[in-house]
Amino acid sequence: MKVTLQHLTKKFPSRSKKDPREVVAVNDFCFEIPDGKLIGLLGPSGCGKSTTLNLLSGLQEPTSGKIFFGDDDVTSLPPEHRGVGLVFQNYALYPHLTVLQNIRFPLENRKGKDRLTKEQMNKKALEAAKLVQIEGLLERKPSELSGGQQQRVAIARALVKMPKILLLDEPLSNLDARLRLQTREEIRRIQRSTGITTVFVTHDQEEAMSISDLIVVMKEGVVQQIGRPQEVYDNPVNLFVAKFLGTPPINVFSARIAGEKLYIGEDAVLSLPGMADREVVAAIRPEGFVPREDGELICQMDRVEVMGRDISVVCRNEAFQGEVIRAIVGSEHIEHTHRDTIRFHLKEGKLFLFDSGDGSRIRF
Ligand code: ATP
């Protein structure tokens, strides 16, 4: 089902006497979520991800703006009438019920013509359990399951009513690294096989990039960019988005344009015909550095971290805005790292320029 957010805004009154300004948790969010897609809602803590999800589920009402599921305006519909499935970070299973009873629970209080027999409920619960591959655990209690298995039960419980929309709020945060990886692939598989429009909230950019059809990057309640993960990575609209995506993170330098050339410190690293002189921020993806004898950017070697096929060259430069630069290069370049300095040629498509004031992108 298509979901439309129209100028969605949520404000909370200030809780602080010192600062009476209200908090704008979600600010004028406009987006049409295409039917059947998985959307990764991404941003640092406090950027408004959970509030957006709560507005979609109906747990909170917007201050202004509207939400449509398909053509239906659901803005003031209570959660139980929206047909959404919700999964939270803490699995919130009922400890005294078995897995089967937990999954079946949302079907139990249906009234009138929607009422199901026990057999019908068990059949639906088994179907949902099969979808998340826990059909062998139906008689266990939650305390007899691993964290990953508990989260699957929570997903099955959200799926049992075949919701129109599935909303997942940091569903993998309580899992260890290996389980996180496995479960996120599982979520992707389930989403693909059911075709349910899904919104997945996370602060982990890698997680969002790896499974989403589209990602939405938020900052302080404001949507910064929406697009396919690769598109956003390759073409960030501002410095915040560029810094938020990618591991290791993008390398950020103070730079300037002078005489139609880009300077990082004293090094002229790129020709910029037609560009006026100004101060800028230059940001270079780790894979944008090519070690070369005649490379334009000179850095001081610190150390090499072996990553197998590639190496991470850790080096320094006075114009760098952080602690150390990390360049990811092929291991065949190792001989370049045996000196005190290393010279890099910079790949143009991996270098972005931003306004040194507001961080907006400068195209060249
Ligand atoms: P996290 O990743 O830490 O969960 P988030 O991106 O989900 O963060 P929200 O929980 O949506 O962020 O919060 C957005 C902003 O709204 C924050 O500044 C938060 O303090 C504020 N906020 C959220 N709920 C309330 C509330 N009930 N009353 C007042 N302010 C709130």
Image: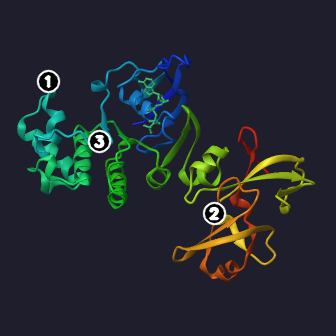
The residue at which mark 1 appears reads as 111
The image quarter containing residue 350 is bottom right
For the residues marked 3 and 1, what is the alpha-carbon distance in whole angstroms? 29 Å
Near-viewer residue (117 or 129): 129
- Vertical comparison of 309 with 191: above or below: below
Looking at marks 3 and 2 on the same chain, the residue that comes earlier in the sequence is marked by: 3
267 left or right, relative to 359: right
Q: Amino acid at mark 3?
A: Asn
In the picture, which quadrant includes the N terminus? top left
Q: Which residue was labeled with disc 3?
A: 90
Is residue 179 found left or right of 289 in the rendered image?
left
Mark 3: few/some/many CA within 10 Å (<14, 14-19, 20+): some
SS state under label 2:
helix
Circle 1 crowding by C-alpha within 10 Å: few under 14, some 14–19, many from 20: few
Q: Is mark 3 within 8 Å of ligand 1?
A: no
- Corner quadrant of residue 164: top left
